[in-house]
Image (cartoon, rainbow, N blue to C red):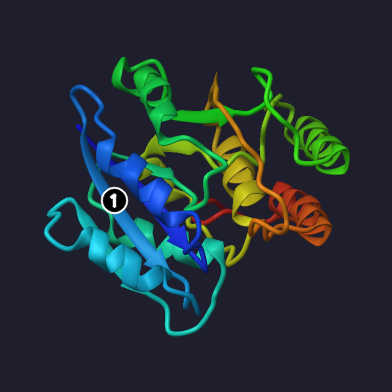
């Protein structure tokens, strides 16, 4: 079984050495790893760093956008290059720990799930701010109201699923609205979402955090839009 890590990168030179070290040491029993990096036109040293990391590693590949297009566009590009049976998004910062993939992949390997979300809300974790915390809870409540399913952490980066399921979603988002779009389409298509607790260490704006309250408003609009928009392959 092969697991593809879809890794969008944009100006993460400060955090890349540590996350690349974690990825280099990641070993999951019974799972072959594939790392697909897409640099989203970084202006710092990020692109060179991931090129150096991938050199000599047959399980790593690198692509680059000639202009900044956003996280969603980078993930779409990475998904198109991936060859694994399973795919998961991995941000290039240090907020999430790749060691949690051990827990995420277990339900899929056991045949108990096709989709697994890593939830930051199923175990005690630090909070970036009260506003972000309550904003995320509001978005989770909107998922329940619109789709009739409870998801404890809709905005989590760690969304793991069988690659054919991922491809079937036909993701359109270019930026951070990829998170609600994935969730909305999974629920619209009737997929059950298993959740496992994960660790989370939020970074500050000074440390490079990019998401803002405007992205939260856009996430709400995205949930509303995909509740009623026609999905590809449906009448």
Residue at image point 52% right, 68% down: 11
Q: Residue at x 57, y 69 (%)?
A: 70
> Viewed as shown, does residue 195 lie left or right of 3?
right
Q: Position of residue 167 (x, y in %)?
A: 39, 51
Left or right of 45? Residue 149 is right
Q: Position of residue 93 (x, y in %)?
A: 52, 51
Residue 164 at x, y = what percent? 34, 44
Image point 71% across, 51% down: which residue? 204
Q: Nearer the viewer, residue 155 or 17?
A: 17
Which residue appears at 19% of the width and 32% of the height? 1
Of 141 and 30, nearer the camera is 30
Q: Is residue 114 visible?
A: no
**What residue would you read off at disc 1?**
35
Question: Is residue 104 among the parts visible in the rendering?
Answer: yes
Q: Residue 36 falls in which quadrant of the image? A: bottom left
- Secondary structure beneath dot 1 equals strand
Q: Can you give x and y, in whole percent of width and height, for residue 72 in the image?
A: 54, 61
């Amino acid at each position: 079984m092969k697991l593809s890590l879809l890794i969008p990168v944009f100006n993460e030179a400060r955090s890349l050495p540590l996350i690349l070290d974690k990825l280099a040491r990641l070993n999951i029993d019974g799972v072959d790893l594939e790392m697909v990096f897409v640099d989203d036109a970084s202006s710092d040293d990020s692109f060179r760093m991931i090129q150096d990391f991938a050199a000599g590693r047959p399980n790593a590949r690198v692509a680059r956008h000639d202009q900044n297009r956003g996280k969603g566009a980078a993930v779409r590009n990475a998904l198109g290059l991936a060859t694994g049976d399973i795919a998961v998004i991995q941000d290039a910062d240090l907020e999430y720990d790749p060691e949690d993939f051990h827990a995420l992949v277990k339900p899929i390997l056991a045949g108990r799930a096709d989709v697994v979300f890593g939830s930051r809300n199923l175990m005690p974790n630090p909070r970036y701010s009260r506003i972000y915390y309550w904003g995320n809870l509001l978005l989770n409540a909107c998922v329940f109201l619109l789709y009739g399913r409870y998801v404890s952490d809709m905005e989590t980066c760690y969304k793991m699923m069988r690659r054919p399921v991922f491809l079937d979603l036909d993701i359109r988002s270019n930026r951070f609205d990829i998170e609600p779009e994935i969730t909305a389409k999974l629920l619209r298509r009737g997929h059950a979402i298993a959740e496992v607790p994960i660790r989370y260490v939020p970074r500050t704006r000074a440390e490079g955090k990019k998401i803002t309250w405007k992205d939260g408003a856009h996430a709400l609009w995205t949930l509303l839009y995909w509740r009623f928009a026609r999905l590809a392959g449906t009448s």
